[in-house]
Amino acid sequence: MGINRGEVGRANRLIEESDSVVVLSHQNPDGDAFGSVLGLGLMLRGAGLNVKASWPDPVELPLKYEFLPGKELLISPADLRPQGLVIAVDCANAGRLGELEDAVLKVDNIINIDHHPDNSLFGTVNLVDAAASATTEILYEEADDLGLELDRDIAVCLYTGLVTDTGRFQFSNTSAETFRIASELVEMGAEPNRLYEEIFQGDTLSYMRLTGEMVSRAVFEPETGLVHVFMPQEELRRFGVEMNETEDLIDSLRTLRGHRIAALFKEQDDGRIRVSLRSRADTDIGTVARSLGGGGHRVAAGYTSEKGSFEEALQELKGEIVAP
Ligand code: AMP
Ligand code: MN
Ligand code: MN
């Protein structure tokens, strides 16, 4: 699914005709969501638009993303009155906009820029490319045709999306194109080692201890290749870690030899269980997440279980996993 050039032209005209724009991304945002919102927000501001940026609450950057430029564009969803033009980035469907969904679906024009294979094309204009490793890769490729310019701060934002969504250029979505773009972003001033230190060496001691606790309780089932663990709210409180700091926690399960699928069950504030799934390249976990009401990529996906307990949610997941 490549990007339709006509859609790019339409997006370009909408941006040219607008004085203001709201840039949004998905709930439980990750590095690609932050990098896309802030990178695109800065590009649009540079083009003379009045820009507001947000995502479903809490609109805070986790500590390790605080270095990102463009934070001044952020505004709480409660203070946002989207009208005119909205641009959604890294967001597979309108439901992922959480409490912002209803207001967004009422605006005249929505540009949907994303790389999820299950994108619902909810925009009035859709720039969707499932072959892109990150949404920031699409923003880099299309900036020129959208009439937008890059600078060093924007390169830092776009590189952040690339390096996080590709697992530091090692997941199966990493292509020669990804490296080419990364190289150009580095030439523009993104510093790989500084960003590595900020993002991947930016753990608090509380987070490291929570990781240790989680790994120590992980269960591996060699017959299905599933490694799984439940993280109750109480544990977050005990370790003093916020939920929005736990987006990468699952990566600590993925280094296990012989596993096929990693599943992290996180109890939410409201008691529901959000399940993050990751798989090795030969196992499609996106289909599993979709059949349980969620979505995502082939090797990184998620959903929120309707089951009341971890045990039931685990059984539900096992029912959808096809034996190797
Ligand atoms: P996560 O484990 O939350 O980081 O999610 C991994 C991937 O699955 C991301 O690409 C998400 O956009 C996608 N994803 C997670 N939860 C959902 C959901 N409820 N509906 C659709 N896509 C989801
Ligand atoms: Mn994302
Ligand atoms: Mn992404």
Image: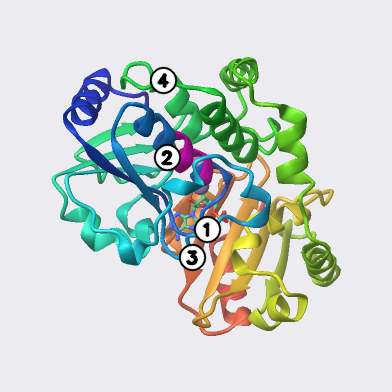
Q: Is residue 185 above or below residue 319?
A: above
Q: Is residue 214 visible?
A: yes
Pointer 2 residue: 117
- Position of 214 compared to 99: left or right? right
Q: What is the quadrant of the N terminus in the image?
A: top left
Q: Earlier in the sequence, mark 2 or mark 1?
A: 2
Circles 2 and 4, Cβ within 8 Å, touching? The answer is no
Which structural element holds mark 1?
strand
Residue at which label 3 appears: 58
Q: Nearer the viewer, mark 2 or mark 4?
A: 4
The answer to whether residue 37 is magenta is: yes
Say which of 172 and 23 sits in front.
23
Q: For this view, does 61 lie left or right of residue 215? A: left
Q: Is residue 160 above or below residue 231?
A: above
* Tag 1: amino acid: Gly
* Three-letter code for the amino acid on which mark 4 is drawn: Glu
Q: On the image, numbered disc 4 is attached to which residue?
A: 149
Q: Which residues are magenta?
A: 34-39
Residue 161, quarter of picture? top right
Quarter holding residue 306:
bottom left
Residue 246 is one of the magenta-drawn residues = no
- Front residue of 133 and 280: 133
Work out how far the residue at label 2 is from the one at label 4, CA to CA, in angstroms: 27 Å
- The CA span between labels 1 and 4 is 34 Å
| Residue that badge 1 annotates | 302
CA separation in Å, label 3 and label 1: 19 Å
Q: Could you say where residue 275 lies in the image, as x and y percent from the top left?
A: 57, 65
Nearer-N-terminus badge (1/4): 4
Does mark 1 have its CB less than 8 Å from ligand 1?
yes
Given the image, on which type of amino acid does mark 3 rest? Pro
